[in-house]
Image (cartoon, rainbow, N blue to C red):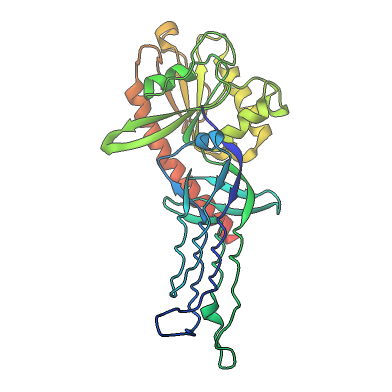
């Protein structure tokens, strides 16, 4: 199951309290203060992991609480700090503090770390309060509380390529042909209600993440047929692959309608690199020609038989290069502004 939005609560551990203690030794009636400090409470730390592609694990557990630091002890022994809790998230995850309504971090690099809830500092033991005028202090500190937050986690980038098409265009069948993903496949609309991700292996051990986006219908940009939800998933892919059913009476109109829905939702989406896939040539043959820009890549395949699947993988690889160029140019344009 693909999950791209969750709410969780994180609570860092409190610091351990300092110790009130005086040194005791045989033949020494009044030893000096030797109360140790309390240990630091455990923090909640998030780390980006490029091998993760969903927030699914967080849907099973919504609360995370770190342990308290150990209390200080006599003989100037400080309490041990509590272990931190490490939470791994996919690249592209945005973390927002819901109470302050502010973004805490946007995970854009593999291995990037951010402390979302800091553990409380340990309290001072009475040995810390010795002064020239107070050699036997009885002061000590309670450990400080850890931070507590309610967080929204939203995955903004789910895949390299999003398969865009009408219901029953063959997106799920194609994804199962390209990868080890096994999405639900049936001959009726809206079989897919949430994105399915597939890892497509390519030459030189490169992987391309492909998302089977739920099928769009005319009027999707107005919310029809869960359109806003589906289009939001498309927005989070680096490139688009329009997949058309050539057994339909008017594939050209299919493409026109899909592009219209995407443009109405976000003009930026129309600027992303794209290719066109003509599916079901095993049924209708490969003679169909579309009226498109001469630079547009068209690949004719059969998702059922696997015909031309290797050609499609090559096209995907070249599409990723275009996506790299697009993103680099986009970042440059934003910086110049």
Determine the residue located farthest toward the top in the rendered image. 283
Q: Nearer the viewer, residue 90 or 210?
A: 90
Looking at the image, which residue is at 48% across and 78% down? 34
Q: Nearer the viewer, residue 99 or 162?
A: 99
Determine the residue located farthest toward the right in the rendered image. 222
Looking at the image, which residue is at 59% across and 89% down? 134
Q: For the C terminus, give its image quadrant.
A: bottom right
From this view, report whether residue 328 is shown above or below residue 233.
below
Image-based side of 177 in relation to 249, left or right: left
Looking at the image, which residue is at 59% across and 51% down? 11
Give how far across and how far down residue 259 sits, in percent: 60, 28
Give how far across and how far down residue 99 sits, in percent: 71, 51
Q: Nearer the viewer, residue 32 or 336?
A: 32
Looking at the image, which residue is at 48% across and 36% down? 159
- In this rendering, does residue 300 appear at all? no
Determine the residue located farthest toward the left in the rendered image. 204
So how many labels did they put on this image? 0
Q: Nearer the viewer, residue 292 or 223?
A: 223
Determine the residue located farthest toward the bottom in the rendered image. 132
Q: Which quarter of the picture shows residue 307?
A: top left
Give how far across and how far down residue 130 sits, in percent: 54, 85
- In this rendering, does residue 115 appear at all? yes
Give how far across and how far down residue 316 sits, in percent: 40, 32
């Amino acid at each position: 199951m693909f999950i791209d939005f969750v709410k969780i609560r994180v609570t860092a551990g409190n610091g351990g309290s300092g110790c009130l203690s005086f040194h005791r030794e045989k033949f020494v009636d009044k030893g000096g203060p030797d109360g140790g400090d309390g240990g630091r409470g455990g923090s909640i730390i998030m780390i980006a992991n490029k091998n993760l592609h969903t927030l699914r694990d967080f849907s099973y557990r919504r609360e995370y609480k770190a342990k308290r630091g150990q209390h200080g002890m006599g003989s100037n022994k400080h309490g041990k700090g509590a272990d931190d809790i490490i939470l791994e998230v996919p690249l592209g995850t945005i973390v927002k503090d819901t109470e302050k309504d502010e973004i805490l971090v946007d995970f854009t690099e593999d291995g990037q770390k951010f402390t979302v809830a800091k553990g409380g500092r340990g309290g001072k033991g009475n040995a810390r309060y010795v002064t020239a005028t107070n050699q036997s202090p009885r002061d000590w500190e309670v450990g400080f509380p850890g931070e507590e937050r309610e967080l929204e986690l939203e995955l903004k980038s789910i895949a390299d390529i999003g398969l865009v098409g009408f219901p029953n265009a063959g997106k799920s069948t194609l994804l199962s042909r390209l990868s080890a993903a096994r999405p639900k496949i049936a001959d009726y609309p809206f079989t897919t209600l949430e994105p399915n991700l597939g890892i497509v292996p390519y030459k030189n051990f490169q992987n391309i993440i492909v998302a089977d986006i739920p099928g769009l219908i005319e009027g999707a940009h107005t919310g029809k047929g869960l359109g806003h939800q589906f289009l939001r998933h498309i927005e989070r892919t680096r490139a688009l692959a329009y997949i058309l059913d050539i057994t339909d009476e008017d594939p050209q109109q299919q493409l026109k309608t899909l592009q219209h829905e995407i443009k109405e939702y976000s003009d930026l989406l129309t600027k992303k690199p794209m290719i066109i896939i003509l599916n079901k040539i095993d049924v209708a043959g490969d003679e169909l020609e579309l009226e498109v820009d001469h630079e547009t890549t068209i690949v004719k395949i059969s998702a059922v038989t696997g015909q031309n699947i290797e050609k499609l993988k090559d096209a995907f690889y070249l599409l990723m290069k275009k996506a790299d160029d697009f993103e680099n140019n986009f970042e440059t344009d934003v910086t110049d502004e």
